[in-house]
Image (cartoon, rainbow, N blue to C red):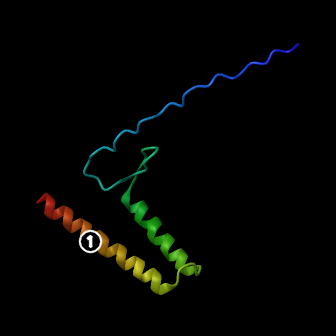
Amino acid sequence: MTETTTPKTTRASVTKLKPAPTNESSDYVVPIVGVHVPSVVVDVAFWGGLAGAVALGVVKPPVGALVGAGVLVARHQIRTHFQSAAG
């Protein structure tokens, strides 16, 4: 005769994420792993991806231009908002 055993159930452990450090740098922090990515790398990746999407025909040039302009306007608004709040 063979004995059958029932597997024991265990509760899944919950890992709480640490809050991102509040430094004044403009680095981006990858949420799960906490890796700092310089803003220059993120900018190059975004603009390169947008240009690549336009070049491959995934996005039409006028739409790509509107997305790019919207990003520039939004970043300008964010910078001026934080500069006025800080000073």
Q: Would you call the spot at circle 1 few (<14 residues within 10 Å), some (14-19), or many (20 or more)? A: few
Which residue shows up at 37% across the image and 59% down it? 39
Residue 54 place in picture, x, y as percent: 53, 80
Task: Give the side of residue 84 with respect to residue 52, left or right.
Answer: left
**Looking at the image, which is closer to me, 12 or 60?**
12
Residue 70 place in picture, x, y as percent: 35, 76
Residue 19 place in picture, x, y as percent: 34, 42
Tag count in the figure?
1
Task: Give the side of residue 45 with respect to residue 27, left or right.
Answer: right
Task: Give the side of residue 52 with respect to residue 15, left or right.
Answer: right
Residue at the extreme left of the image, as rendered = 87
Relative to residue 55, is residue 46 depicted above or below? above
Which residue shows up at 14% across the image and 64% down it? 84
Asked which secondary structure carries label 1, the reply is helix
**Looking at the image, which is closer to me, 5 or 72?**
5
Which residue shows up at 54% across the image and 75% down it? 52
Which residue shows up at 30% across the image and 69% down it? 75
Task: Tell me the quarter of the image containing the N terminus.
Answer: top right
